[in-house]
Each structure stands twice: as structure tokens, then as C-alpha cells.
Amino acid sequence: MPVTPLEPSDPQRLGDFVLTDRLGAGGMGIVYLGRGRDDAPVAVKLVRADLAHDETFRERFRREVEALRRVSGPRVAALVDADTEAPQPYLVVEFVDGPTLADSVARDGPLEGPRLRALAAALAEALVLIHEQGVIHRDLKPSNVILAADQPKLVDFGIAAASGAMPLTMAGTVIGSAGWMAPEQAAGQVSTPAVDVFTWASLVAFAGTGRPPFGMGGPEEVTARILSGEPDLAGLPQEVRPFVEAGFIKDPLQRPSAKAVLAGLLGGDDADPTAELVEETTHLIEHTWVGALPLATASATPTPVVPPPPPPAPPTSMPPVAVAAGAAAPRRRVWPVVLVVGLAALVLGAAGALLLAGRGDDGAGNGATAAPATAAPAVTTTTAAPAPPISVTARLTLDANDFGDFFEQLLTGDAGCIVPEVSVGLETPDGEVLVPPTAFPAGAQVDGGLFDACEYTLVFAQVAGVDDYRVTLEDQEGEFDPAPVSRAEIEAAEGVVDLNELFEVEQIVGPV
């Protein structure tokens, strides 16, 4: 992270902390690099003098400090100290050395492969921990993510809020950073933890493509795209794309929780204990993350760092995880067992060789000279590697809700799309079930309004890799003949299987 010398007007000390350099300045104040009594580096955020006299702002600052006191986790910068009642309030947090995500992408380009997945999981884990403490970050953006050498970390809770807390602004006031907000946040509605999931998707999309997902332009132009447009995900790797797409659902009630996203990325279940998911995230980062050198100290010819190899992928024969937001294959830590078995085989083989070397050809171990054996020619067997697993998104668009649905909505108070009784599955051409019939979750209206079409999406992640699949479909009227679709066709469609194209969609009974 670039630093600049202190200016004459800067303080030399705040509380127990000596200030040494400037780290940056923003709308709320100045951030300094400092050191405490233990000489550990810290970041000190000092509020501007004019804002210190604004009681509304001071109360917001108190809330930021309170939010930080409640939040802890390996991927969140820890609060060290704070004084919210000083003439100029300040807070002190752990100093995280490294470039911001914005600086890293500008310098080195998008993240790829396991490194991108590790970033996605790290940020999702941070959200899980802060949401479980009743805190909403509300300002996820590339400049608030630091790529340290050992792991990514989330910083700056400047506009964090407690879930359900009374807002400090008038209704309709937008709180957030232009281009990095959820639709409901941009519309000035009350924020829920779902806003962080949407902006998590924006961050991961930016990290994986090098572009803001809703493009460049003025605040009004970008906000209009967030409210009614679709994100640009061209080039985003498939291993994170289903989770990002789910995070971009406009309706906050339909978005997955941060815990569901994290569990999917790890191949787990959102019912797993949070501590277990944190452990798995740490395991993933340890095996995939290679931090960039800090911008202030990067060498012109850095020494390449090679990450330790990741554990072997789970067997593709495991049943895939099917969730509305997408999921990864179930995790299994098989590599320690493989290592132990391999070492045991090596020891037994060596012992056998020594035993045979100590015996003569008379078989009694009397030291007789053994006749040289003729070595059998080596036989090389080439086994084709199984096709890697694939993620499949089943998409179904049903006709507009009919008058029966309309009156049912009036009677029941339900709005929007009703969950249809439609199940979809995948199998091989010879009938082996790869994904059992799975019901669609609630859908989203394509164009809005009571009589517009409803779109339903179901993601099957880490489906066993084969060359050809058969899609099975069943609704409350009965079962359809399975429709063939090849792996190449699925990949060409970026993982999407459009059921409207495979089946006679007018025969499918709509929402009931």
C-alpha cells in the first residue's frame, strides 16, 4: 500500500499511537500509518474536524466502532482501539500490508483459477461472520479489499449498520458507493444483509474480469444499470460464475445468504457450523493463495512464489449438489490418507527388496550367487483421464400468470411468481442418474407486473463429466421424454440448459 510522509498540519500522536506516515484521505477523514506500544503497525483513521461537530455523523462513527467491536474473523481487519468522544474521533485497526483489489487488478489484471475462488470464499466468509453479529457492511468495493501476502482481508466499516437499526438518514437517501450497491440500496430502501451479497457478486465479477460489472460512467448512469440492467459477466470463470449470478438476483428475498454462497464455494452445506466453514476456507486459502507484493515495496524483478499443490479433487462419481445459487462438489479431505497409503507401500516395497537381496537363488538365504534375471519388458498402460465435472444451470421461463393465479395472489397476499410443481434432473444416455429430479425454487418475473412471464433457475454444480447427457423433466401433469444434450452444447451456452428449447414449453403446466 503506498504511503506518503506526514504533512505539517498532521498530528504526531493520537492516544497511545505514534503516527509515522499517511496512507490516504477520503470523504470522512485521513488514514495514517502508526505504531502502538508493542511497535506493531496499525492504521489510524482520524475524522475530519468539520465532521466531528456534526452529531449525526458522530453517531454514525460510534456505530462503525460498535460494529467493528462485534466483528472478528481471520479475513476481517481487527479493531485495536478507538476514541469516539475525542474532539476529533479516531479509530485504530490492524494494518494489512498489500495492494487493494483495485490496485492489484489495475496492475496485474484479473484473478484466475483457484486464486479467484479463494478470494470469493474469503470475502463470503467475512460476510458470514459480520452478518452473524447483526452487522451489515454496506460498502463492499475493490478499494476496501486488501490482498495481503497470506490472504485477502476486508477493511473499512465506515457505513456499516446493525441489522434492524434505525437509519440515520431520511428515507430515500442513498448510502453507499456509486457502482457498488445493490438495487434496493441504490433505491434508498432499508438495507438488509442481502445488499452485501449483491455487492460481493460485484466484487468477485470485477476480480475475475477486470471490469466493473455494470460498466463505467456517471453515478446516475451506473445506478440505472444496477436497478434495471444486467451485469457484464463475459469471461468470468465458470467455477465462481453460478454463485455470482445468484448474488445478482434483483429481488433481495431471492438471493442466497452469504453462508449459502460460502458453503457452495466450499462444497459444503449452509447447515454446517460456521466454525467448520471457516476452517475449510482457511484450508482453501493455504493451498491456493499467493499474495502479490505490496505496491510500495514491489521489486522490479520479484522472485516467483510457487503455491503448495491443492488437494486432489473429489471423485467425480460423487452426487452433485443442487441449489438455487449453485454449489461445488462435496468436500472430502482424502489427500492425507493417500499420502499415508503411499508411504506404507514405499516402506513395504523397500523391505521386500532388502529381503530378496539377502537371499540366494536357493531361497534359503545362504549367500548363493543369484543368476541375473531377465527383466520383463515394461508395459505402459494409458488410461484416459475422466472428463472433469461440469456445472449446469437449468432455466425455465413460463407464460404469464393467468387470472386464477391473479385472484389467488389477491386472496393469499402472495405477489410475484408462484413456485411451479416442475422437477428437472440429469442422467447419462444409458439411464444412470447423475442428478435426481429436483424441484425449482421460486422464480423471478422477467419484466415485472402481475401478468408477465416468470423465470426459474436451478444450478447443478460439479455434475459428473460425460460427453452426453439426458435432461429429465416432470410436472404435475406427468413425465416428459428425456431430451438429449451434449457437453459441448452445454459449454457453448456457458453452462445454461434452456428447457424452453428442449421441451414443448406450452405443455408445461405453469405456476400453481
Image (spheres, rainbow, N blue to C red):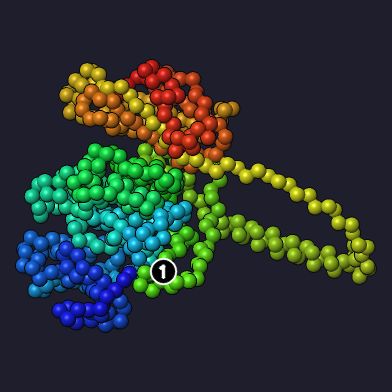
Q: Amino acid at mark 1?
A: Leu
Q: On the rendered image, what quadrant is the C terminus found in?
A: top left
* Front-most of residues 375 and 299: 299
Asked if residue 75 can be seen in this view, the reply is no
Q: Look at the numbered disc 1 and give the secondary structure of its residue.
A: loop
Residue 154 percent location from the top left of the image: 31, 61
Give x and y (percent) for residue 475. 39, 22
- Determine if residue 509 is in view: yes
Q: x, y (%) of residue 258?
A: 32, 49
Q: Residues within 10 Å of mark 1 (few under 14, many from 20)?
A: some
Q: Which residue is mark 1?
A: 293
At x 10%, y 55%, the residue is 168
Horizontal side of residue 462 vs 41, given as left or right: right
* 186 versus 362 height, above or below: above
Q: Quadrant of residue 412?
A: top left
Q: Position of residue 130 (x, y in %)?
A: 27, 57
In the rendered image, the vertical position of residue 295 relative to residue 451, given as above or below = below
405 sits left or right of 494 in the view? left
